Image (spheres, coloured by chain):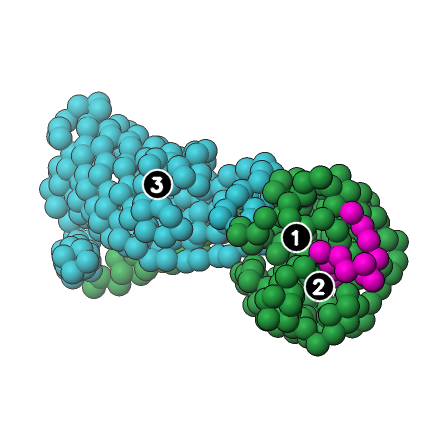
Amino acid sequence: MKSLSKFIIVIAVVLFANNSLKAQNGLEMNVNYNVGLPTTGLKDYITKPSFRGFTGSLDYAINSQLRVGLGIGFNDYYQKYPRQVYNNNDGAISAVIRNSIQQTPLTAHINYTITKTGFIRPYVGAGAGVNFISFDQYLGEFDNPTTKTKAIAQGEAGVFIPLSRYSSTAVKIGGTYNFAPFNEFGTNNLNAWGIQAGIRFPLH
Amino acid sequence: MNWNIKSTTLCFLAIGFLVLNGCKKDPLKNLSNDDSRIYISNYDSTINFASYKTYSIADSALVMEDNHFLGRVHGNYETAVISQLKQLMQQRGYTLVDTSAKPDLAINVSEVINTQTTIFSYDDYWDSYGYYYDPGYYGYPGYGYYSPYSYGSYTVASAALEVDLLDLKNATADGNKITAIWVGLARGEDVFDTNNVSTEISTLFAQSPYLKTSN
Protein backbone atom coordinates (compact mmCIF):
# COMPACT_ATOMS: atom_id res chain seq x y z
CA MET A 1 0.00 0.00 0.00
CA LYS A 2 2.95 2.29 0.71
CA SER A 3 4.47 1.78 -2.72
CA LEU A 4 1.03 2.23 -4.22
CA SER A 5 0.72 5.60 -2.51
CA LYS A 6 4.11 6.63 -3.81
CA PHE A 7 3.10 5.64 -7.32
CA ILE A 8 -0.05 7.74 -7.15
CA ILE A 9 1.84 10.69 -5.70
CA VAL A 10 4.43 10.56 -8.47
CA ILE A 11 1.76 10.56 -11.14
CA ALA A 12 -0.12 13.37 -9.41
CA VAL A 13 3.04 15.44 -9.15
CA VAL A 14 3.69 14.99 -12.85
CA LEU A 15 0.18 16.11 -13.67
CA PHE A 16 -0.11 19.02 -11.27
CA ALA A 17 3.37 20.39 -10.85
CA ASN A 18 4.73 20.52 -14.36
CA ASN A 19 4.39 24.16 -15.44
CA SER A 20 5.12 23.30 -19.03
CA LEU A 21 2.16 20.98 -19.45
CA LYS A 22 -0.06 23.47 -21.14
CA ALA A 23 2.69 24.77 -23.33
CA GLN A 24 3.41 21.30 -24.59
CA ASN A 25 -0.27 20.50 -25.11
CA GLY A 26 0.56 17.19 -23.46
CA LEU A 27 -2.64 16.75 -21.54
CA GLU A 28 -5.20 14.40 -22.96
CA MET A 29 -8.52 13.05 -21.85
CA ASN A 30 -9.89 9.56 -22.36
CA VAL A 31 -13.58 8.83 -22.11
CA ASN A 32 -14.77 5.27 -22.63
CA TYR A 33 -17.82 3.12 -22.37
CA ASN A 34 -16.91 0.03 -20.39
CA VAL A 35 -18.48 -3.41 -20.22
CA GLY A 36 -17.47 -5.31 -17.09
CA LEU A 37 -17.12 -9.08 -17.26
CA PRO A 38 -16.97 -10.78 -13.85
CA THR A 39 -14.29 -13.39 -13.26
CA THR A 40 -13.12 -15.56 -10.35
CA GLY A 41 -14.41 -14.23 -7.00
CA LEU A 42 -16.87 -11.73 -8.44
CA LYS A 43 -18.60 -14.60 -10.24
CA ASP A 44 -19.57 -16.00 -6.84
CA TYR A 45 -22.11 -13.19 -6.71
CA ILE A 46 -22.54 -11.90 -10.24
CA THR A 47 -22.19 -13.91 -13.41
CA LYS A 48 -23.79 -11.46 -15.81
CA PRO A 49 -21.77 -8.73 -17.52
CA SER A 50 -22.21 -5.15 -16.47
CA PHE A 51 -23.31 -2.89 -19.29
CA ARG A 52 -23.46 0.10 -16.96
CA GLY A 53 -19.87 1.21 -16.90
CA PHE A 54 -17.51 3.96 -17.90
CA THR A 55 -13.86 4.73 -17.63
CA GLY A 56 -12.05 7.98 -18.04
CA SER A 57 -8.59 9.35 -17.53
CA LEU A 58 -6.47 12.44 -17.69
CA ASP A 59 -3.13 11.58 -19.24
CA TYR A 60 0.04 13.49 -19.76
CA ALA A 61 2.00 12.58 -22.88
CA ILE A 62 5.64 12.48 -21.90
CA ASN A 63 6.46 11.77 -25.53
CA SER A 64 4.62 10.39 -28.51
CA GLN A 65 4.51 6.90 -27.01
CA LEU A 66 4.57 7.17 -23.25
CA ARG A 67 1.76 8.56 -21.14
CA VAL A 68 1.08 8.77 -17.44
CA GLY A 69 -2.24 9.70 -15.93
CA LEU A 70 -5.00 9.43 -13.40
CA GLY A 71 -8.00 7.33 -14.21
CA ILE A 72 -11.42 6.69 -12.82
CA GLY A 73 -13.86 3.93 -13.63
CA PHE A 74 -17.26 2.74 -12.68
CA ASN A 75 -19.20 -0.44 -13.16
CA ASP A 76 -22.53 -1.43 -11.71
CA TYR A 77 -22.98 -5.18 -11.39
CA TYR A 78 -26.44 -6.50 -10.66
CA GLN A 79 -28.05 -9.89 -10.74
CA LYS A 80 -31.31 -11.32 -9.52
CA TYR A 81 -31.59 -14.95 -8.52
CA PRO A 82 -35.06 -16.54 -8.38
CA ARG A 83 -36.51 -17.77 -5.13
CA GLN A 84 -34.51 -20.60 -3.68
CA VAL A 85 -34.02 -22.25 -0.31
CA TYR A 86 -30.58 -21.69 1.16
CA ASN A 87 -29.72 -24.13 3.93
CA ASN A 88 -27.32 -23.53 6.78
CA ASN A 89 -26.32 -25.57 9.83
CA ASP A 90 -29.42 -24.89 11.88
CA GLY A 91 -32.01 -23.73 9.45
CA ALA A 92 -32.85 -22.39 6.05
CA ILE A 93 -33.96 -19.25 4.34
CA SER A 94 -36.14 -18.96 1.28
CA ALA A 95 -35.59 -15.75 -0.61
CA VAL A 96 -35.25 -14.02 -3.93
CA ILE A 97 -31.71 -12.72 -3.87
CA ARG A 98 -30.47 -9.62 -5.62
CA ASN A 99 -26.78 -8.86 -5.61
CA SER A 100 -25.74 -5.30 -6.32
CA ILE A 101 -22.05 -4.41 -6.53
CA GLN A 102 -20.51 -1.16 -7.67
CA GLN A 103 -16.80 -0.68 -8.22
CA THR A 104 -15.23 2.72 -8.68
CA PRO A 105 -11.47 2.39 -9.17
CA LEU A 106 -9.33 5.51 -8.94
CA THR A 107 -5.91 4.73 -10.35
CA ALA A 108 -2.62 6.16 -11.45
CA HIS A 109 -1.44 4.53 -14.61
CA ILE A 110 1.17 4.41 -17.29
CA ASN A 111 0.47 3.70 -20.93
CA TYR A 112 2.85 2.85 -23.73
CA THR A 113 1.91 2.99 -27.40
CA ILE A 114 3.94 0.36 -29.18
CA THR A 115 4.06 1.98 -32.64
CA LYS A 116 4.47 5.67 -33.38
CA THR A 117 2.82 5.53 -36.76
CA GLY A 118 0.20 3.54 -38.55
CA PHE A 119 -3.55 3.44 -38.84
CA ILE A 120 -3.79 1.15 -35.81
CA ARG A 121 -1.44 1.74 -32.89
CA PRO A 122 -1.40 -0.96 -30.23
CA TYR A 123 -0.80 0.00 -26.62
CA VAL A 124 -0.20 -1.66 -23.29
CA GLY A 125 -0.56 -0.19 -19.87
CA ALA A 126 -0.70 -0.80 -16.17
CA GLY A 127 -2.16 1.00 -13.22
CA ALA A 128 -2.77 0.82 -9.53
CA GLY A 129 -4.84 2.68 -7.02
CA VAL A 130 -7.82 2.42 -4.76
CA ASN A 131 -11.12 0.74 -5.45
CA PHE A 132 -14.27 2.11 -3.85
CA ILE A 133 -16.65 -0.81 -3.51
CA SER A 134 -20.31 -0.81 -2.64
CA PHE A 135 -21.51 -4.33 -1.87
CA ASP A 136 -25.15 -5.03 -1.19
CA GLN A 137 -27.05 -8.29 -1.08
CA TYR A 138 -30.82 -8.12 -0.89
CA LEU A 139 -32.77 -11.02 0.57
CA GLY A 140 -36.23 -10.07 -0.54
CA GLU A 141 -36.51 -6.42 0.40
CA PHE A 142 -33.94 -6.68 3.17
CA ASP A 143 -30.35 -5.75 2.68
CA ASN A 144 -27.18 -5.14 4.56
CA PRO A 145 -25.15 -2.61 2.54
CA THR A 146 -21.41 -2.39 2.92
CA THR A 147 -18.85 -0.03 1.49
CA LYS A 148 -15.17 -0.83 1.39
CA THR A 149 -12.05 0.82 0.05
CA LYS A 150 -9.50 -1.64 -1.25
CA ALA A 151 -6.41 -1.61 -3.43
CA ILE A 152 -6.69 -2.40 -7.11
CA ALA A 153 -4.21 -3.15 -9.89
CA GLN A 154 -4.93 -3.05 -13.58
CA GLY A 155 -3.33 -4.30 -16.74
CA GLU A 156 -4.56 -3.14 -20.10
CA ALA A 157 -3.99 -3.56 -23.81
CA GLY A 158 -5.70 -2.39 -26.94
CA VAL A 159 -5.41 -0.16 -29.95
CA PHE A 160 -5.65 3.53 -30.72
CA ILE A 161 -7.00 4.52 -34.11
CA PRO A 162 -6.06 8.15 -34.83
CA LEU A 163 -8.76 10.17 -36.54
CA SER A 164 -6.21 11.97 -38.66
CA ARG A 165 -2.53 11.77 -39.41
CA TYR A 166 -1.65 14.95 -37.52
CA SER A 167 -4.05 14.78 -34.59
CA SER A 168 -3.64 12.95 -31.31
CA THR A 169 -7.39 12.50 -31.19
CA ALA A 170 -8.02 8.80 -31.53
CA VAL A 171 -10.60 6.12 -31.07
CA LYS A 172 -9.66 3.70 -28.34
CA ILE A 173 -10.62 0.03 -28.25
CA GLY A 174 -9.16 -2.07 -25.52
CA GLY A 175 -9.42 -4.39 -22.62
CA THR A 176 -8.49 -4.12 -18.97
CA TYR A 177 -8.09 -6.73 -16.31
CA ASN A 178 -8.83 -5.55 -12.81
CA PHE A 179 -7.17 -7.33 -9.91
CA ALA A 180 -9.50 -6.28 -7.13
CA PRO A 181 -8.85 -7.87 -3.72
CA PHE A 182 -11.87 -7.95 -1.46
CA ASN A 183 -11.70 -10.62 1.27
CA GLU A 184 -15.26 -10.08 2.47
CA PHE A 185 -18.44 -12.16 2.45
CA GLY A 186 -16.65 -15.36 1.58
CA THR A 187 -14.89 -14.16 -1.54
CA ASN A 188 -11.33 -12.95 -1.82
CA ASN A 189 -11.61 -10.79 -4.91
CA LEU A 190 -13.93 -8.94 -7.23
CA ASN A 191 -11.79 -9.36 -10.32
CA ALA A 192 -13.24 -8.45 -13.69
CA TRP A 193 -12.40 -7.87 -17.30
CA GLY A 194 -13.27 -4.54 -18.81
CA ILE A 195 -13.94 -4.13 -22.52
CA GLN A 196 -13.74 -0.51 -23.54
CA ALA A 197 -14.47 1.67 -26.51
CA GLY A 198 -14.04 5.41 -26.45
CA ILE A 199 -12.12 8.39 -27.54
CA ARG A 200 -8.90 10.12 -26.59
CA PHE A 201 -8.56 13.82 -27.29
CA PRO A 202 -6.09 16.54 -26.37
CA LEU A 203 -6.98 19.30 -23.92
CA HIS A 204 -5.83 22.57 -25.48
CA MET B 1 -0.33 28.84 -14.26
CA ASN B 2 -1.81 25.38 -13.99
CA TRP B 3 -5.22 26.42 -12.80
CA ASN B 4 -6.90 25.00 -15.88
CA ILE B 5 -5.17 21.67 -15.50
CA LYS B 6 -5.96 21.40 -11.81
CA SER B 7 -9.55 22.50 -12.13
CA THR B 8 -10.08 20.19 -15.07
CA THR B 9 -8.67 17.29 -13.10
CA LEU B 10 -10.70 18.04 -10.00
CA CYS B 11 -13.87 18.52 -12.00
CA PHE B 12 -13.16 15.30 -13.83
CA LEU B 13 -12.82 13.39 -10.57
CA ALA B 14 -15.84 15.03 -8.91
CA ILE B 15 -18.10 14.54 -11.89
CA GLY B 16 -16.82 11.03 -12.23
CA PHE B 17 -17.81 10.11 -8.70
CA LEU B 18 -21.17 11.85 -8.78
CA VAL B 19 -22.36 10.91 -12.23
CA LEU B 20 -20.97 7.43 -12.43
CA ASN B 21 -22.29 6.41 -9.03
CA GLY B 22 -25.70 7.64 -10.15
CA CYS B 23 -25.73 4.92 -12.78
CA LYS B 24 -26.58 2.23 -10.26
CA LYS B 25 -29.54 0.01 -10.98
CA ASP B 26 -32.04 0.16 -8.13
CA PRO B 27 -32.44 -3.43 -6.83
CA LEU B 28 -35.82 -2.62 -5.28
CA LYS B 29 -37.32 -1.17 -8.45
CA ASN B 30 -40.14 -3.35 -9.75
CA LEU B 31 -39.85 -5.61 -6.73
CA SER B 32 -43.08 -7.57 -6.41
CA ASN B 33 -44.59 -8.16 -3.00
CA ASP B 34 -44.04 -11.90 -3.45
CA ASP B 35 -40.37 -11.36 -4.14
CA SER B 36 -40.04 -8.99 -1.20
CA ARG B 37 -40.88 -11.71 1.31
CA ILE B 38 -38.35 -13.99 2.93
CA TYR B 39 -38.97 -17.12 4.97
CA ILE B 40 -36.53 -18.09 7.69
CA SER B 41 -36.59 -21.29 9.71
CA ASN B 42 -34.24 -22.18 12.51
CA TYR B 43 -34.16 -25.30 14.63
CA ASP B 44 -32.17 -27.06 17.30
CA SER B 45 -30.23 -29.62 15.30
CA THR B 46 -29.70 -31.77 18.40
CA ILE B 47 -33.42 -32.35 18.75
CA ASN B 48 -35.11 -35.49 17.49
CA PHE B 49 -38.43 -34.13 16.35
CA ALA B 50 -39.78 -37.65 16.00
CA SER B 51 -39.73 -37.99 19.76
CA TYR B 52 -42.59 -35.52 20.11
CA LYS B 53 -46.10 -36.74 19.42
CA THR B 54 -48.62 -34.18 20.56
CA TYR B 55 -48.98 -30.44 20.44
CA SER B 56 -51.23 -27.61 21.47
CA ILE B 57 -51.77 -24.29 19.77
CA ALA B 58 -53.16 -21.00 21.02
CA ASP B 59 -56.27 -19.73 19.28
CA SER B 60 -54.92 -16.23 18.82
CA ALA B 61 -51.70 -14.43 17.95
CA LEU B 62 -49.51 -12.22 20.05
CA VAL B 63 -48.92 -8.74 18.67
CA MET B 64 -45.61 -7.02 19.32
CA GLU B 65 -44.85 -3.53 18.08
CA ASP B 66 -41.38 -2.04 18.48
CA ASN B 67 -40.65 -4.51 21.25
CA HIS B 68 -43.86 -3.68 23.12
CA PHE B 69 -46.61 -6.19 23.74
CA LEU B 70 -49.90 -4.87 22.36
CA GLY B 71 -52.11 -7.85 23.14
CA ARG B 72 -53.59 -10.84 21.38
CA VAL B 73 -55.56 -10.78 18.17
CA HIS B 74 -57.89 -13.30 16.58
CA GLY B 75 -59.02 -12.21 13.13
CA ASN B 76 -59.34 -13.81 9.73
CA TYR B 77 -55.61 -13.80 9.16
CA GLU B 78 -54.80 -15.39 12.50
CA THR B 79 -57.55 -17.98 12.02
CA ALA B 80 -56.09 -18.89 8.63
CA VAL B 81 -52.57 -19.18 10.03
CA ILE B 82 -53.65 -21.41 12.89
CA SER B 83 -55.76 -23.55 10.59
CA GLN B 84 -52.88 -23.98 8.15
CA LEU B 85 -50.53 -24.87 10.99
CA LYS B 86 -52.92 -27.52 12.27
CA GLN B 87 -53.22 -29.00 8.80
CA LEU B 88 -49.47 -29.21 8.22
CA MET B 89 -48.72 -30.49 11.72
CA GLN B 90 -51.23 -33.25 11.10
CA GLN B 91 -49.54 -34.08 7.80
CA ARG B 92 -46.26 -34.35 9.67
CA GLY B 93 -47.82 -36.82 12.09
CA TYR B 94 -48.39 -34.69 15.17
CA THR B 95 -51.59 -34.93 17.16
CA LEU B 96 -53.42 -31.87 18.38
CA VAL B 97 -54.47 -32.13 22.02
CA ASP B 98 -55.84 -29.83 24.66
CA THR B 99 -53.40 -28.14 27.00
CA SER B 100 -54.83 -30.18 29.85
CA ALA B 101 -53.50 -33.32 28.14
CA LYS B 102 -49.91 -32.18 28.69
CA PRO B 103 -48.83 -31.84 25.04
CA ASP B 104 -45.22 -32.43 24.06
CA LEU B 105 -45.12 -29.24 22.03
CA ALA B 106 -46.79 -25.84 21.98
CA ILE B 107 -47.14 -23.58 18.98
CA ASN B 108 -47.18 -19.85 19.44
CA VAL B 109 -48.09 -17.48 16.64
CA SER B 110 -47.03 -13.87 16.87
CA GLU B 111 -47.09 -10.80 14.71
CA VAL B 112 -44.11 -8.53 15.00
CA ILE B 113 -44.43 -4.99 13.73
CA ASN B 114 -41.42 -2.75 13.54
CA THR B 115 -42.32 0.83 12.65
CA GLN B 116 -38.94 2.33 13.35
CA THR B 117 -36.41 2.53 10.58
CA THR B 118 -33.57 1.70 12.86
CA ILE B 119 -31.40 -1.31 13.49
CA PHE B 120 -33.77 -3.95 14.74
CA SER B 121 -32.51 -7.06 16.43
CA TYR B 122 -34.62 -10.11 16.92
CA ASP B 123 -32.50 -11.01 19.89
CA ASP B 124 -33.79 -7.91 21.64
CA TYR B 125 -37.25 -8.74 20.45
CA TRP B 126 -37.12 -12.16 21.99
CA ASP B 127 -35.94 -10.79 25.32
CA SER B 128 -39.04 -8.63 25.49
CA TYR B 129 -41.28 -11.13 23.82
CA GLY B 130 -40.53 -13.98 26.20
CA TYR B 131 -41.65 -11.84 29.05
CA TYR B 132 -45.14 -11.57 27.59
CA TYR B 133 -45.60 -15.23 27.00
CA ASP B 134 -47.97 -16.86 29.38
CA PRO B 135 -46.38 -20.17 30.36
CA GLY B 136 -49.44 -20.83 32.46
CA TYR B 137 -51.47 -21.15 29.26
CA TYR B 138 -49.69 -24.43 28.60
CA GLY B 139 -49.72 -25.53 32.20
CA TYR B 140 -46.23 -24.34 33.09
CA PRO B 141 -46.68 -21.27 35.28
CA GLY B 142 -43.48 -19.61 36.40
CA TYR B 143 -41.37 -21.16 33.67
CA GLY B 144 -39.00 -19.03 31.62
CA TYR B 145 -38.49 -19.01 27.87
CA TYR B 146 -35.39 -19.43 25.83
CA SER B 147 -34.61 -19.02 22.14
CA PRO B 148 -31.13 -19.75 20.84
CA TYR B 149 -31.76 -18.24 17.42
CA SER B 150 -30.56 -15.04 15.93
CA TYR B 151 -31.99 -13.40 12.85
CA GLY B 152 -29.51 -10.59 12.54
CA SER B 153 -30.32 -6.95 12.37
CA TYR B 154 -32.19 -4.99 9.76
CA THR B 155 -32.49 -1.31 9.07
CA VAL B 156 -35.95 -1.22 7.62
CA ALA B 157 -39.42 -0.92 8.98
CA SER B 158 -41.38 -4.08 8.37
CA ALA B 159 -43.74 -6.66 9.70
CA ALA B 160 -43.14 -10.31 10.43
CA LEU B 161 -45.11 -13.42 11.20
CA GLU B 162 -43.38 -15.66 13.69
CA VAL B 163 -44.28 -19.23 14.56
CA ASP B 164 -42.53 -20.78 17.54
CA LEU B 165 -42.50 -24.47 18.37
CA LEU B 166 -41.93 -24.78 22.10
CA ASP B 167 -40.63 -27.81 23.91
CA LEU B 168 -43.01 -28.52 26.80
CA LYS B 169 -42.00 -32.15 27.12
CA ASN B 170 -38.55 -31.35 28.49
CA ALA B 171 -39.36 -28.04 30.14
CA THR B 172 -38.97 -29.31 33.69
CA ALA B 173 -35.84 -31.31 32.89
CA ASP B 174 -34.37 -28.20 31.28
CA GLY B 175 -34.56 -26.35 34.58
CA ASN B 176 -38.08 -24.99 34.29
CA LYS B 177 -37.25 -23.46 30.94
CA ILE B 178 -39.38 -23.68 27.83
CA THR B 179 -37.12 -23.76 24.80
CA ALA B 180 -38.07 -22.85 21.26
CA ILE B 181 -36.85 -25.82 19.25
CA TRP B 182 -38.11 -24.48 15.93
CA VAL B 183 -38.84 -20.95 14.83
CA GLY B 184 -40.36 -19.95 11.53
CA LEU B 185 -40.40 -16.38 10.36
CA ALA B 186 -42.03 -14.72 7.36
CA ARG B 187 -41.12 -11.14 6.60
CA GLY B 188 -41.83 -8.67 3.83
CA GLU B 189 -44.66 -6.91 2.06
CA ASP B 190 -48.23 -8.08 2.62
CA VAL B 191 -47.09 -10.65 5.13
CA PHE B 192 -50.36 -10.23 7.06
CA ASP B 193 -52.52 -10.72 3.98
CA THR B 194 -54.83 -13.72 4.44
CA ASN B 195 -54.28 -14.69 0.80
CA ASN B 196 -50.60 -15.30 1.54
CA VAL B 197 -51.08 -17.55 4.57
CA SER B 198 -50.90 -20.81 2.65
CA THR B 199 -47.64 -19.83 0.94
CA GLU B 200 -46.10 -18.53 4.14
CA ILE B 201 -46.76 -21.57 6.31
CA SER B 202 -46.23 -24.18 3.62
CA THR B 203 -42.89 -22.61 2.65
CA LEU B 204 -41.70 -22.67 6.24
CA PHE B 205 -42.67 -26.31 6.59
CA ALA B 206 -41.28 -27.29 3.19
CA GLN B 207 -37.84 -26.01 4.13
CA SER B 208 -38.07 -27.91 7.44
CA PRO B 209 -38.33 -31.56 6.36
CA TYR B 210 -36.98 -32.76 9.73
CA LEU B 211 -40.12 -31.45 11.38
CA LYS B 212 -42.09 -34.68 11.57
CA THR B 213 -42.88 -37.40 14.04
CA SER B 214 -42.97 -41.16 13.77
CA ASN B 215 -46.20 -43.03 14.22
Three-letter amino acid code of the residue under disc 2: Val
> Percent from the top left, x then y, of residue A117?
14, 27
Res A59 visible: no
Q: Residue at x 17, y 23 (%)?
A: A118
Q: Report the mark closest to the observer, 2 or 1.
A: 1
Left or right: A169, with B72 as reference point: left
Q: Earlier in the sequence, mark 2 or mark 1?
A: 2
Region of the chain picked out in magenta, as a range? B95-111
Q: Residue at x 81, y 71 (%)?
A: B71
Badge 2 and badge 3 both on one subunit: no
Q: Residue at x 59, y 48 (%)?
A: B48
Left or right: B184, with A14 as reference point: right
Disc 1/disc 3 C-alpha distance (Å): 32 Å
Q: Which chain is green?
A: B
> Percent from the top left, x then y, of residue A65?
13, 37
Question: Circle 2 sits in a helix, a strand or a loop, which is it?
Answer: strand
Judging by the rendered image, the residue that carries numbered circle 2 is: B112
Disc 2/disc 1 C-alpha distance (Å): 13 Å
Q: Report the mark closest to the observer, 1 or 3.
A: 1
Three-letter amino acid code of the residue under disc 3: Gly
Q: Which chain is cyan?
A: A
Judging by the rendered image, the residue that carries numbered circle 3 is: A41
Q: Callout 3: residue from which chain?
A: A
Q: Callout 1: residue from which chain?
A: B
Judging by the rendered image, the residue that carries numbered circle 1 is: B184
Residue extending farthest top = A119
Three-letter amino acid code of the residue under disc 1: Gly
Disc 2/disc 3 C-alpha distance (Å): 37 Å
